[in-house]
Image (cartoon, grey):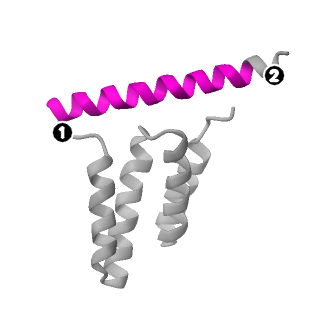
Amino acid sequence: YPDWVEPANRLATLRYLEGDFNESVQLCLRVLRKKPWHFGASSGIVMCYVKLAERANQQSLVDEANRWASEAMPQPGKQREEWVQRMLLLMDAKLAELDEIADKSNL
């Protein structure tokens, strides 16, 4: 299953709990590249950048946490509806890619 991201997401959670926030960020990014609508990875990457900012006391890391928080699903309302529509388009594109892979493997 080329789109199965849950093992990487679980590993990201483990790395976060172990305090390896940089590795957790990389794993969250891997998940979000495949499934940008993934709630766990979206919240996980924000949590990691917050911890990294606390450690390093760097505004750029706070800014990165805020940037990722703004990409996560918004509160109910017009912005959430727009976010859902955008994610549905991405899901449709991913499903089309998977169908293409399946078609090629059945040749």
Provide the secondary structure element on which disc 2 rests.
helix
The majority secondary structure of the magenta stretch comes to helix
Whether residue 75 sits left or right of residue 7 in the image: it is: left
- Which is more toward the observer, 54 or 62? 62
Lateral position of residue 67 relative to residue 24, left or right:
left
Q: Is residue 11 magenta?
A: no
Crowding near the residue tagged with mark 1, few <14, some 14–19, many ≥20 C-alpha atoms within 10 Å: few
Label 1 to label 2: alpha-carbon separation: 41 Å
Quarter residue 106 falls in = top right
Residue highlighted by disc 2? 105
Callout 2 amino acid: Ser
Of mark 1 and mark 2, the one earlier in the sequence is 1
Q: In the rendered image, which residue does mark 1 sit on?
A: 75
User: Looking at the rendering, which quadrant does residue 6 occupy?
Assistant: top right
The residue closer to the viewer here, 73 or 78, is 78
Residue 80 seen from this side? yes
Q: Given the image, on which type of amino acid does mark 1 rest?
A: Gln
Left or right: residue 27 versus residue 76 is right
Q: Position of residue 12 (x, y in %)?
A: 53, 57
Vertical relation: 70 (above or below) 95: below
Q: Which residues are magenta?
A: 76-102
